[in-house]
């Protein structure tokens, strides 16, 4: 029988102590996504009790090319907190376990978004390019989808770039968000390239998927004032 309270305690301790542990599913193969989200919720409550404030959500595994590697068939989600968002200055990664960087599109909502892309667009007040830093509490990035969910969907930090009013994307922001391309460089050397359509076809579609997932699972819906980072445009 899966003891979600004990799993949550172990994962919280590993995060706070910047250490890794064996994937939960290795010893408890019955761990499924539903149990993973139950663990996520316990960890979330513990983090809020210690003073963190949730400011939005992150979506993971929006690139279907990654699904087989991690045993998932759908994107996953987790919380983003005030103490994990970086709006200016530098970010130290020393406290994170096996960190990786993901270039992403971030939306901020002035109103609670409905599930359709046009309605989502009407609810956005700004869009930003940013980087999510993800980490693995499991050595070598070896885990199953339920492990990732339980571990906060691997969220470590979110670096938010310039906030651009949605109107600045022009007359067809849906097309712009689908068709843009970017290159990820390290010390001037190209590492990865990607485009908006890598994110479930469009970052807006990723938000629609999240809204439906939250509704099905009974988790709190997106509200006005939240931000959503929509998933990596390139490989991490």
Image: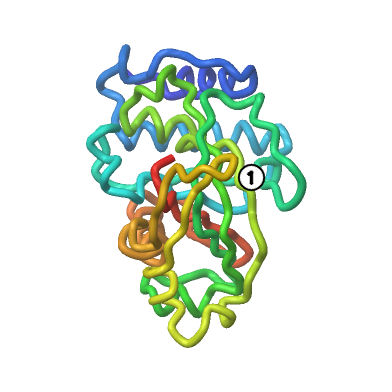
Kindly tell me whether residue 42 is visible in this rendering.
Answer: no
Depth check: give the residue in front, 155 or 93: 93
Query: How many labels were placed on the picture?
Result: 1
Q: Residue at x 63, y 48 (%)?
A: 159
* 150 over 224 or under it: above or below: above
Depth check: give the residue in front, 118 or 7: 118
Q: Is residue 11 left or right of residue 81?
A: left
Q: Position of residue 54 (x, y in %)?
A: 63, 48
Q: Is residue 72 left or right of residue 172?
A: left
Q: Position of residue 81 (x, y in %)?
A: 64, 45
* 196 over 131 or under it: above or below: below
Q: Residue at x 60, y 70 (%)?
A: 126
Q: Quadrant of the C terminus?
A: top left
Q: Position of residue 152 (x, y in %)?
A: 49, 35
Q: Residue furthest right?
A: 89
Q: Residue at x 56, y 16 (%)?
A: 19
Element under disc 1: strand
Kindly tell me whether residue 209 is visible in this rendering.
Answer: yes
Depth check: give the residue in front, 66 or 220: 66
Q: Position of residue 40 (x, y in %)?
A: 47, 35
How packed mark 1 is, by other alpha carbons closer than 10 Å (few <14, some 14-19, many 20 or more), is: some
Q: Which residue is mark 1?
A: 81
């Amino acid at each position: 029988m899966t003891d979600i309270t004990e799993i949550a305690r172990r994962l919280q301790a590993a995060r706070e102590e910047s250490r890794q542990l064996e994937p939960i599913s290795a010893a408890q193969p019955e761990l499924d996504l539903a149990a993973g989200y139950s663990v996520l919720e316990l960890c979330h409550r513990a983090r809020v009790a210690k003073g963190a404030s949730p400011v939005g959500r992150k979506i993971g595994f929006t690139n279907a090319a990654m699904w087989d590697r991690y045993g998932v068939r759908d994107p996953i989600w987790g919380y983003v907190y005030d103490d994990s968002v970086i709006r200016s200055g530098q970010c130290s990664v020393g406290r994170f376990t096996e960190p990786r960087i993901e270039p992403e599109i971030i939306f901020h909502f002035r109103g609670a978004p409905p599930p359709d892309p046009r309605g989502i667009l009407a609810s956005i007040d700004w869009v930003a390019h940013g980087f999510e830093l993800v980490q693995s509490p499991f050595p070598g990035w070896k885990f199953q989808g339920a492990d990732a969910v339980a571990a906060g969907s691997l969220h470590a930090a979110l670096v938010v770039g310039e906030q651009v009013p949605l109107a600045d994307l022009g007359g067809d922001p849906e097309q712009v968000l689908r068709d843009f391309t970017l290159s990820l460089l390290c010390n001037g050397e190209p590492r990865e390239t990607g485009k908006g359509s890598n994110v479930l076809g469009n970052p807006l579609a990723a938000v629609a998927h999240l809204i439906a997932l939250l509704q099905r699972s009974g988790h709190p819906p997106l509200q006005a004032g939240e931000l959503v980072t929509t998933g990596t445009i390139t490989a991490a």
